[in-house]
Amino acid sequence: MTKSALHLFPRILTKLPLVFTAFSLFASSAFGAVSMNMALTVPNQATVGASGQTGSLSFTRTSTAPNTFGNLTLSGIKLTPGSGSSPAPPSIRDPGVFSYVTAVGRAGTAFGGLTFTISLSDPTTGEVELIPSAPPTLLGPPGSAAATGIIDFTFNVVKIPFFDAQPGTAGLQTYHLARAFGTKDSITVNVRPSSSVTVLRAQPSLSTSTPGTIQLGGSISNAATLSGAVNPTGTITFTLFGPDNNTCSGAPIFTSVKPVNAGGTATSGAYTPSSGGTYRWRVVYSGDANNISATRDCGDPSNTVRVLFLVIVSIQKAANNVTIVFQGLAGQPHQVQYRNTLNPFETWTTLPGIFVADGTGRFTFNETTALPSRFYRGVVP
C-alpha cells in the first residue's frame, strides 16, 4: 500500500462560551483514506490564579473504505500550555501560562476507563504528553461507538501571557496547542488543533488595619493585606488625611509607599499627629502583570483612627475665673482652644499663650473671662 501526501482542511476558530478549533487530516492510498478529526475545547476566558479549569480533546475516526476495518492507533498526544500564535514557532511559545493537572478518558467513548499521565516532553516550550494508563489508545471503525474518544483534562491558570496572540482583541490572548498521530496499516496522519483563551488578571481584595484610637502624642500606621493575589509585586501607597477631613479631599498630610512582600502584605511608615481629631487613610495597591489594582478608601472604618486630645486632670471655677490642669507631653509646648457649644460644626478658637508641660507632662491654664458654657481642649501646635 502506497502513501500519498497529507491534506489539511482550513482551521475554524470561533469565540463561543467554549472556544472550539478542529482539524481534519487524512492520508489516502490507492484503496481509500485513513483520516481522523481532532478538536480542542477550552473556556474562552480564564483568570490568573484560577484552578480546576476544564478542557477536552476529542478524536473521531473518519476513514473511508476500505480503511474502515480494524483500529486506528493514537500516539504522541501532546498539549502546549500557551503560545503567541497558532501554529507557532518555538520562539513565541509561552510556557507557564497554564499548568495541566489531570487527564482522564470520558466514559461512554473509546477512551472510557483510561487515565493519562501528564509528562513534560519539551521544557523549552512547556509541551506535555498525555500517556495512557493502558496503551495503545485505539479508535474503532468509523460510525461505531468506538470511533470517537474524548479526553477531559483540567488546568490551572498560572500567569499572564508574555505574548499577545491577538493584539487587535481586548485583553491578552494565548493559545492552547495540541497535536497527535494516528496510524493504520503503516499510514500515519498528524493533527494539530488549537484554541485561544483570553487570560484576565487576578482581582485581589485589600484589607487594612490601623489602631482605632490613640492618645495625642502617639503614632499611627496602617497594615495592608492582599487576598486573592497571585505572586503579587508592585507597591502599596498609604495616604493619610486629617484631622477631621471626612472626604479625604485636598493634599494628604502624610504619604508612605511600601513594596508588597511575598506574602502580599505591607505596612506604612509611622506618623505622629500634632493635634487630636479623626484621621483617615486611603490605601492603594498598584497592581502588576498578574493582578489588577485594589483600593481601600477613606470611608472604610478600618482606615479610621481617632486621636484623643489632652486629658484634663482637674478644673476649678469661681465666678468667671477658671483654672485647668492638662496632662500633655512632657517638655512640649501646648495651646488651649475653646468653643461655646458642643456642636461638632462649631470652630474651635485658640486662646493666646503657649504652655510648656513640666517633666510629668502637666501644664496649668488660667482664664479670667470664662463663660458659663465654655468648653476647652488642649492641643499640640
Image: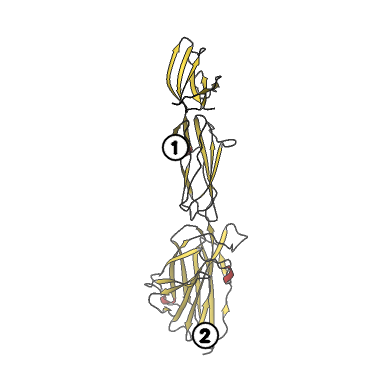
Front residue of this view, candidates 177 and 356: 356
Q: How many marks?
A: 2
Q: Is residue 44 above or below residue 347?
A: below
Q: Is residue 97 above or below residue 251?
A: below
Q: Residue at x 51, y 33 (%)?
A: 273
How much space separates mark 2 and mark 1, taking CA atoms?
80 Å
Where residue 210 sits: x, y (%)? Answer: 46, 39
Where residue 203 sits: x, y (%)? Answer: 50, 51
Q: Are marks 2 and 1 in contact (CB under 8 Å)?
A: no
Kind of residue sitting beneath label 2: Gly
Disc 2 or 1, which lies upstream in sequence?
Answer: 2
Which numbered marker is on residue 211? 1
**Tag nearer the camera, 2 or 1:** 1
Answer whether residue 132 is visible to the viewer in this image: yes
Where residue 289 sits: x, y (%)? Answer: 55, 56
Residue placed farthest to the bottom in the image? 1
Kind of residue sitting beneath label 1: Pro
Which numbered marker is on residue 34? none
Q: Residue at x 52, y 78 (%)?
A: 190
Residue placed farthest to the front in the image? 359
Q: Is residue 53 above or below residue 204?
A: below
Query: Mark 2 highlights which residue?
Result: 32
- Mark 1, secondary structure of its residue: loop
